[in-house]
Amino acid sequence: MSRRQVGLGALALGGGLAFASLPADPAAAAPSRGGDRPPLRHGPAREAGLLPGPLKQLVTDAEAFLRPSPEHPWYAGAVLLAGRGRTVALHEPIGMAVRYQSYDEETDTGVEFPPDQQIPMAEDTVFDLASVSKLFTSILAVQQIERGRVELEAPVASYLPDFGRAGKQDVTIRQLLTHTSGFRAWIPLYEAPTYEEKVQRLYDEALASPPGSAYLYSDLNLISLQLVLEHVTGRRLDVLLREEITEPLGMRRTRYNPPASWKPKTAATEDARRPWSGLDRGLVWGEVHDENAYSLGGVAGHAGVFSDAWDLAVLARTLLDGGVCGRRRILRRESVELMFTDFNTAFPGDEHGLGFELYQHWYMGAMATPRTAGHTGFTGTALVLDPTTDSFLVVLGNSVHPVRSWRSGSAPRVAAANQLARAVPVRPVRGRTAWFSGMAGAATATLALPPLDTSSGAARLSCALWWDTEPKADVLVLESSADGGTAWEPVPFTTRRRGGAPEQHPTGTATGWSGRVWHDLTADLPAAAGLVVRWRYTTDRLYVGRGAYVDGLRVERGHRRLFDESRPADATRLRVAGWSREEG
């Protein structure tokens, strides 16, 4: 069964959930022992099982975006947090939480506060999370599914009859959580003068596509889910957040509508004025940036939550531990599995669990796996959880300070995720080192054996291979040349992971996700008097995976070894461009 079939088969009587065992997955998080686990703590990289060098580079890379990149700074400042297991190995503030008092549109410059009024970032600086807020709404929804008050496949209109207007009668709760409802991305609810009229405008909104027929990310999905939650529980969303998530987990710096006393420790956002903003508000600082959330009183299903990096690390650790923090459980382990399960298999590239985005290289970078879950926020925030390596990343930046047009793309998030992925070591199959392709974008790396005489045939190459690349865009190729390198032909090969079935690679290529485990590889080589065999790893300019590793290269013909990497004389004959020996 596919993961989506498993998820859909999890619906039970009475609106709750019943779960069959999910398929075994090497990416599954380590089992949690609940209350006998120590609390999250700061510690050195080695204690977390991370390499310190990439973590230092993570900060260096992040600091580069405080400068024009290329035209303007991507953010005025940021707080970076990275950890693995129970250990937060990096918790670093950079830049300024409050730098600009306004934006000058005529000169496209930020008007800075006097130096004595600017506020540097601190470890506990609070940020407007923007759309990362959607994760909290999603968790609250899954809690109510557990308790039988909400059914995953139930029509939203069964809870909110007026929602069914304008052809929305078949939209389900699952479609809200996976952005497959058919809603367009956004409407200016703030133009409606009263709360009741804003809700009515949502109810009157027609769909852009039939429910379940397309993926389209929309704030309206989570606003609708907010209305469902408030209806079935009789509590406002901010009360639900406090009572069901932040108080049980001890997240003391996470809430809607932070009090005025928090403002000096809160990162400023935008000089919000028309035409780039929907509302004329001036410098937004200590209040929600999103116009619709602001017009809804600061409490909205799609935006409005404020938090700091440590609190988000607590949430990340809770989810990686299967919904438990210490002796407090906010979700069943099976529910977390569903949140990390792809329900959008019909829409490749838009993988999505219940609320969580999955496998998105555009901000997860090399942390992306089919099980990596996360979300971003328009203000410059991101949370990424990788159950495969039990690691988590928080990037909180104020990238709309002083104006939203200064930021573009997601380069700081990708750079941070790449370095955290790089910090997780890959243990060689034998010895202390293995050949590593590197993780550079828009690059080609080659690892070539010396010319071999395979003219009598029956020569076979064997090695251990580990790969994780951006699917299809970045490709590892085994190829050979019989004319000294003028022409190259692919060499088909077979891989087998421990306990698995053989996998054929008839085109001589490997790309995408391989489970981040070593595979045994064999390949029959063509007959030639001076055959050159090489690995070639090619990446595009956008995103990369964790790369490729090769260990224990050997070529044999019967009982005779034509090449053996373990022999120093043979190893020195390898021709290397871009690959390096790396310790695990």
Image (cartoon, rainbow, N blue to C red):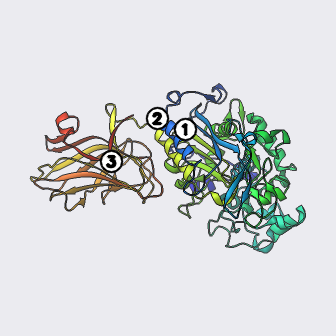
Task: Compare residues 415 and 234 and report the one nearer the observer.
Answer: 415
Image position, residue 25 (x, y; %): 50, 44
| Horizontal relation, residue 382 to residue 478: left or right | right
Tell me the element at label 2.
Answer: helix
Disc 2 versus disc 3: distance between alpha carbons?
A: 19 Å
Q: In the image, what residue occupies the spot 20% across and 38% down?
A: 572
The residue type indicated by label 1 comes to Asp
Question: How many residues crowd mark 1 within 10 Å: few (<14), some (14–19), many (20+)?
Answer: many
| Horizontal relation, residue 94 to residue 537: left or right | right
Quadrant assignment for the C terminus: top left
- The residue that mark 1 highlights is 390
Image position, residue 231 (x, y; %): 85, 55
Q: Is residue 29 above or below residue 523?
A: above
Of badges 1 and 2, the one in the foreground is: 2
Q: In the image, what residue occupies the spot 75% across and 45% down?
A: 306
The residue type indicated by label 3 comes to Gly
- Hey, which quadrant is residue 325 in on the image? top right
- The residue that mark 2 highlights is 53
Q: Residue 552 shows which numbered tag?
A: none
